[in-house]
Amino acid sequence: MNAPYVMINGVPYSPRHPKVLALAKVDQLVEVAAVNMPKPKPAKRIRQSQKPKLNKLELEYQVVLVNTAGVETETIVAQGMRFELGTGIWYRPDFTCIIDGRFTCIEVKGPHAFRGGFENLKVAARTYHWMQWILVWKIIGEWRSQTILP
């Protein structure tokens, strides 16, 4: 029992039970105990996650991206923007930044990504065709990229 209760002769009752209310009126309560009452947690006003946003491969590419010519490093945002592809369908690229004056979204895929995230990337590239969309992957220690056409 997690809620407070009243013990009467070793039997727990709800504080609103008629037997408890009757005894309370006549001052015959023998034993009152609140057992298993959890301490209230302090309320959080803002939900904040402390989990890392990027996986190992994405962190590795972020270093490459920062050192790439033409990238405005102060505009690099890791998983900070999301794009609506349809009603209730959202896509969040791994990086958004400005490269050579053009708003760019970059998706990093691992070596075993064959299907799954590519469809959303293609739909996003077609829906938001004024942006540049780039797919990046790593093969044998070398980074490769492909611009996704609208």
Image: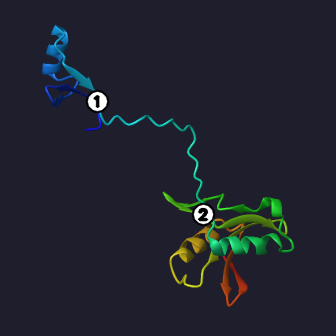
Q: Is residue 36 above or below residue 144?
A: above
- The quarter of the rendered structure image containing the C terminus is bottom right
| 34 vs 113, nearest the viewer | 34
In-front residue for pair 144/2: 2
Q: Whole-percent x and y of residue 10?
A: 15, 30
Location of residue 117 in the rendering, given as x and y in whole percent from the top left corner: 54, 74
Q: Quadrant of the N terminus?
A: top left
Q: Residue at x 56, y 77 (%)?
A: 118
The residue drawn where x is 58% and y is 48% is 48
Residue type, mark 1 in image: Pro
Residue name at image x 58 percent, y 58 percent: 51
Which label belongs to residue 24? Answer: none
**Residue with the mark numbered 2:** 92
Residue 29 figure quarter: top left
Up/down of 79 relative to 125, above or below: above
Query: For the point 63% across and 66% down, which residue is it?
Result: 54
Quick check: 40 above or below 50?
Answer: above
Q: Where is residue 8 shown, x and y percent of the image?
A: 16, 24
Q: Position of residue 66 (x, y in %)?
A: 80, 69
Q: Identify the amino acid type marked 2.
A: Arg
Q: Quadrant of residue 50?
A: bottom right
Question: Can residue 126 be seen from the camera position used here?
Answer: yes
Which of 114 and 29 lies nearest the eye of the viewer?
Answer: 29
Q: CA distance from mark 1 to mark 2?
A: 46 Å
Image label count: 2
- Please, which residue is most extreme toward the top here? 26
Question: Does dot 1 land on a helix, a strand or a loop?
Answer: loop
Q: Which residue is mark 1?
A: 4
Toward which corner of the image does residue 99 lie, by quadrant? bottom right
Which residue is at the far right?
69
Badge 2 marks a residue whose secondary structure is: loop
Residue 107 in view: no
